[in-house]
Image: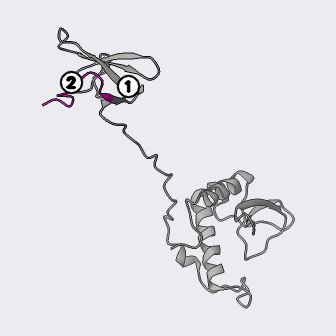
Amino acid sequence: MNYFDGIKVGDKVWDFQYGWGKVIDILKNNLNFPIVVIFENGEKESFDYNGKPFKNSNQTLFWDEIKFEIPKKPKVELKENYSKLIKPSAKINYTYTSFEQIKRFARLLALRDQECQDSRGYEPKLGKKSYGITKEAISKKFHIYETYDNCPDRVYLKTKEDAQKICDILNSGRFDLEGE
């Protein structure tokens, strides 16, 4: 049994390349490509009873439009267990820092070390330019800032390119600082 058994002149069909068309002839003397279709753009093409055009060995003609969903870029998964980064530290002032802030810090640190080879393990020197990222309160978008300090409770990146890469990952939703 063929895909287009029972097709007749006037039937509406859809093709990957041309879109919607209408069957204008079924050639009785052409057994290989008897179905003739004219498309909305004016192109005319012949097909066999399985929807394969003369110049292609794959089916491109169908009874209805085939819809594709473009897959989203996959989320970034941490390769290492970042929870080992969450441990008491004399450097962090726990009086003003919540456990959730510490988790975000640790996840951001792990993301930086995983995704940015140049910034892996980077600790800035006071007075030397490095880069940080901050989340804008209204737009909720991450942005780069240039800094010359070295606060122990912030994540720093060695290059502007690395900072931009982390901002792009966070702004695209491919990594969630709040998640597990």
Relative to 79, is 102 on the left or the right? right
Q: Looking at the rendering, which quadrant does residue 4 occupy?
A: top left
Considering the whole magenta stretch, tell me its main secondary structure.
loop
| Amino acid of disc 1 | Gly
Relative to 138, is 149 on the left or the right? right
- Tell me what residue is drawn at x 50 percent, y 72 percent: 81
Badge 2 element: loop
Pointer 1 residue: 21
Magenta stretch in the rendered image? 1-12
Say which quadrant the N terminus sits in: top left
Image location (x, y in percent) of residue 66: 36, 39
- Which of the pair 166/50 is nearer the observer? 50
- Rounded to the nearest whole Å, what is the CA distance between mark 1 and mark 2? 16 Å
Image location (x, y in percent) of residue 131: 76, 60
Badge 1 element: strand
Relative to 24, is 34 on the left or the right? left
Q: Residues within 10 Å of mark 2 (few under 14, many from 20)?
A: many
- Tell me what residue is drawn at x 51 percent, y 65 percent: 78
Please tell me which of labels 1 and 2 falls first in the chain.
1
| Amino acid of disc 2 | Tyr
- Tell me what residue is drawn at x 27 percent, y 21 percent: 9
Relative to 167, is 15 on the left or the right? left
Q: Is residue 147 visible?
A: yes
- Tell me what residue is drawn at x 63 percent, y 87 percent: 88
Q: Is residue 60 visible?
A: no
Pointer 2 residue: 49
Quick check: is 10 in the magenta stretch? yes
